[in-house]
């Protein structure tokens, strides 16, 4: 039930925000540096990294000795982690997208996605059509209520299609897919009616197709978190990846980052980039030794587990 309370907190200048941190017990050795950093980060975003440093007896105060620089280091770790994860997801997304396009186009035809029979009945084909039409630039004329073919588009291949063809009204899947978000592609995958096609898409990734579909969906969620610069450190994820049978016993907290790290490395391994990425991942932990991987779902001896050990030869 919605509260009827009235919000009365005033907006604070950056200098006042720094003074507020000091009043709460944070050690700020260089106030000018703190002002510059908060000006580029934002107080509210920065405060998300302070929660583990709150006093257990008074959450409005910080634990003794908590410093601005200490929290800033965690922020920088998270930023570097986010960039590293985004790079990995880009590799995975491109490979998954290519697999969906190739398998569906060759088995179902270039314009298969325009036919309701290729989707589970619970899926609304009209909703998919709307998203695709928006992506390729088709709009309704407010006067005639007719669909308008785009004359200009940010992608030249879309312009080329409509300059040369008028039927079908949408470009083939290999063009259309390049304009769609990873989230829409994950929905397309999850609602494909032909399970043999789904199995063929998932096959190179060495995981059961049911798990694979959920991984793609959860990765699209993680991608959005990275794209919007959301915190990965110390986060409980609302759309965690499903734990594959081969990873049972390895992933104890599916809603922590370790679960995503396992999925990323597993998928990267199927396209030949796992070792390269794990090296960079390990370098990040070396640069920030104060960050506790256990708090992110890793076991204390995670590098010695059967999954991770091959990447860390003695």
Image (cartoon, grey):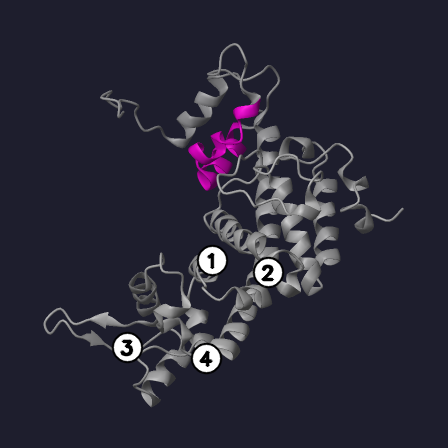
Query: Which quarter shows the N terminus?
Result: top left
- Residue behind mark 3: 150
User: Nearer the N terminus, badge 3 or badge 4?
Assistant: 4
User: Nearer the N terminus, badge 4 or badge 2?
Assistant: 2
Residue 312 or 7: which is nearer the viewer? Answer: 312
Percent across and percent down for residue 102 are 54, 75
Percent across and percent down for residue 110 are 44, 79
Question: Are the two marked residues, 3 and 4, in contact with CB atoms closer than 8 angstroms?
Answer: no
| Callout in the foreground (1, 2) | 1
Residue 92 image label: 2
Looking at the image, the residue that sits furthest to the bottom is 164
Give the total of numbered labels.
4
- Residue behind mark 1: 190
Residue at x 64%, y 30% (from the top left corner): 295
Percent across and percent down for residue 245 are 67, 46
Magenta-drawn segment? 31-52
Residue at x 45%, y 70% (from the top left corner): 177
Q: Is residue 217 left or right of residue 179?
A: right
Mark 1–mark 3 Cα distance, whole angstroms, equals: 29 Å
SS assignment at label 3: loop
Question: Are the two marked residues, 2 and 3, in contact with CB atoms closer than 8 angstroms?
Answer: no
């Amino acid at each position: 039930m919605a509260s009827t309370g009235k919000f009365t907190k005033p907006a604070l200048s950056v200098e006042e925000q720094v003074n507020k941190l000091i009043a709460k017990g944070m050690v700020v050795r260089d106030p000018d540096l703190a002002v510059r950093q908060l000006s580029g980060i934002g107080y509210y975003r920065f405060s998300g990294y302070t929660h583990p440093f709150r006093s257990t007896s008074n959450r409005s105060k910080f634990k003794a000795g908590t410093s601005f620089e200490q929290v800033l280091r965690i922020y920088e770790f998270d930023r570097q982690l986010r960039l590293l994860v985004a790079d990995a997801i880009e590799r995975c997304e491109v490979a998954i997208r290519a697999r969906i396009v190739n398998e569906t186009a060759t088995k179902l035809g270039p314009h298969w996605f325009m036919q309701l029979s290729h989707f589970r009945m619970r899926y609304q084909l009209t909703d998919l059509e709307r998203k695709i039409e928006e992506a390729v630039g088709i709009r309704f004329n407010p006067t005639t209520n007719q669909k308008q073919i785009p004359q200009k588009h940010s992608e030249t291949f879309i312009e080329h299609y409509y300059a040369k063809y008028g039927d079908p009204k949408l470009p083939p899947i290999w063009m259309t897919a390049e304009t769609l978000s990873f989230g829409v592609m994950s929905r397309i995958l999850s609602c494909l009616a032909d399970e043999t096609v789904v199995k063929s898409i998932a096959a190179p990734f060495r995981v059961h197709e049911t798990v694979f579909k959920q991984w793609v969906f959860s990765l699209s969620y993680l991608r959005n978190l990275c794209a919007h610069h959301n915190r990965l450190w110390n986060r409980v994820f609302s759309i965690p990846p499903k734990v594959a049978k081969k990873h049972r016993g390895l992933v104890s907290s599916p809603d922590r980052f370790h679960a995503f790290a396992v999925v990323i490395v597993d998928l990267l391994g199927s396209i030949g980039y796992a070792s390269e990425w794990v090296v960079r991942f390990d370098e990040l932990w070396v640069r920030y030794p104060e960050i506790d991987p256990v708090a992110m779902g890793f076991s204390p001896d995670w590098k010695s587990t059967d999954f991770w050990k091959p990447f860390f030869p003695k």
